Structure formats: C-alpha cells, structure tokens
Image: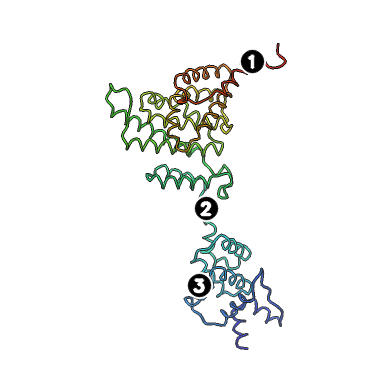
Amino acid sequence: MEEVERVRRESKAVRKVLGGGGGEVAVEGKVDVETFREAVEMMLEDEDEVAAMRRLARGGVARAIGLLEVSFSLMFDRGVNNCVKYLEAVPWNEAEEERIKSLLSQDSSYEAASRNLLARLQPQNPTSSAELVVELIGSMTKGTKNNARKELRTLVSSILSKTSIYIKSDKELDKRSIYCICHSCLKCLVGLFEESSDLVPADQAAISVGKGPLERIYKQIEDLNWLLQILIDKQMGEEFVDLWANEKTLRSMHGRASPMVRYELSRISATIFIAMGSGKLHCTGDKKFSIFQAWFRPMLVDFGWLRRYPKGLNMTTLEEGIGQALLTLPLRQQQVLFMEWFEAFSGQGRECPNLMKAFQVWWRRSFVRSLGTT
C-alpha cells in the first residue's frame, strides 16, 4: 500500500484514477513494458537530480525519450523534468530529434519545463534565412584559406541546391544583397589589375603580376564564378550578364595583361556562354550581343590557356555553349562573329574554340534554301 500511495502522489494520472474509484491509465504511442516499469521505479526512488541524470545516461537518449513519453502520459512531473533536463544536455540524431519534436507538439502542458528543450528545436526570435545566407556568402568571399573556402563553397551550395531540404523557395535568397557582393568582388578585381599595372614600367607592353597579386586575382575570379553559378541556378543571373558586358575597365586591361592573368577573366565569360547556350540564362537579343561584343574576342585569344589550365572547366561543353549561344543571335550578328572566329581559327588552330558545327548551322540557315522555297 505504501508503494501505491507513493505512485499516487507522484502521478497525477494515477491519482485521478484512484480518486475515482478505479479504472485504467492509457499511455500514448508504442511504449515497451520495460520503459513503463522504469518510470514507476523512478516514482518509488528518492533520487536527487544527479542520480536521476546518471540513471538516464545509462539508458541513453532513446530510452530517455521513451521515459519522457510515459511521464507525459502519467503526468509524472519529476520524471518529465528529469528527462527534459537530460535530453537538453545531450546530442541527438535526426530520428531522435523527430521523436522529441513529435512528443512536445502533442503535449503543451509541460511547455514551461520544456522551454530550453524547445529552444533547440525552434528559434524563439527567428532570423531570416535570406539574411544568414548573404552573411555566409559574404564571409566566405573574405576568407583566405583556399581549402577551407572550397569546403565552405560546397557547404553553402548544398544548402542552396534546388533539392536541398534547407531552402524552401527562391524567396530565401536575397538577390539585391548577392549582387552587392558581386559588385564588391568586381571592384576588388579591378583594383588588383590596376595595382599590378602600377608596378609595370610605362614602356612595357604587357602587365605581369607577382605570385601574391596573382593568387588574389584567382580568388576573386573563383568567388565571382561561384556567385554567378548561384544566381544562374536561382534564375537570377541575367543582371550579371549586363554587369559583365559593361565592365569596360577590365576589358581594356585584358589586352595589356599577361596571358597567365587575363585568361582568368575569360573563365567568367565561359560560365556565361555555357549558361546561355544551355538555356539557363534567358537574355534578350541586345544583352546577348553586348556580351559577345565585349568578351567574344578575348575568349578567342584565351581559349588555349583555358584548355591548358581548365581548373574543372569542361572545354567541350564550353565550345558547345559558345556555338549554341551564338546561334540564338540574329543571323546578321552571327555572321559578324562567325567571320571573326573563322579568321582567328585559321591563324590559331586548336588554340581557338572549335565552332564548326555551329558555323555550319548558321551557313545553312543563312544561305541554303529550305524545302518549299523557290
């Protein structure tokens, strides 16, 4: 009888049943008999908090969740408090997290006791994910350790992926803020080229740079290409095409820069041409022609360097992308650019992109009469 009285005092549910002259206590969910027995043992023992934590630690997280579920059903306050404190202090795996989340959502009567536990499951003053993404991207572009930057780019890209469980919609990416970072990277890139040109005597034909400035230029190009890829994936990249087409300072420096520096600029153009040729960038005719006017000739000059140092760039994909992008222009504009390519290819050979397939398509559309014409 003493044990029954002890259980009655500890459990509001048992007290309610016994006070009504009998009945049964229902425990929600699938709870094994051993867990129920352990909950009753906790009621019968005078454990301080330290002893209770040790007991729960021996059983582990899964057992503590089961005990919390039983304690909820029995309205066993001390059991709930001990389980909550233990679970708050230890890490969980994803399945355990879902069980805890489900339990807390089903029973709000212990909300005060579970406050710290809830704080691990849902932010009390949530920050916009768009703001955090911009902060992560901005922080990554300021990093200096190449290997760490590469790992962080992969991490952020996985979060922003279309198949990601972390980003629910494109609204969670702030376009304006991303473009602010793009402008900042471009400004830094221009400064690095200007800095390198200041170190070269006025009568020297080409700008060459030391290892330090060169590595910083590589870093800015990497960052810009990564930002551009994010914008393309989120269908926000058209504005970047305008930005790059109108970058007159870098374009003018391209002709004076050392080949080992200037070809990096064409790496950005390559990303744009591939995206245009595959239909991932939806630009109007004027935008398309402006990017070719600005960066097609530099691409013809730099292609051989890109082939030697692709850094992950698929050169066949680039050739196909340039050709397909060219074929989206009006035929007269295509003619100007294909003739420029023809002349460059005849002098440079495979140092130039092979656009023969696209050239044949342009020629057929321009000069070979289709069926039914006279």
Residue under label 1: 368
Q: Nearer the viewer, mark 2 or mark 3?
A: 3
In the rendered view, tell whether residue 227 sits above or below residue 333: below
State if disc 2 and disc 1 touch (CB < 8 Å).
no
Residue under label 3: 57
State if disc 3 and disc 2 touch (CB < 8 Å).
no
Residue type, mark 2 in image: Pro
In the rendered view, tell whether residue 70 sits above or below residue 238: below
- State the image coordinates of residue 332 (x, y, percent, origin top left): 56, 16
- State the image coordinates of residue 176 (x, y, percent, origin top left): 50, 37
Which structural element holds mark 3? helix
Residue under label 2: 126
Real-space Cα distance between discs 3 and 1? 81 Å
Q: Nearer the viewer, mark 3 or mark 1?
A: 1
Q: Is residue 13 left or right of residue 182?
A: right
Mark sitting earlier along the chain (2/3): 3
Residue type, mark 1 in image: Val
Real-space Cα distance between discs 1 and 2? 63 Å
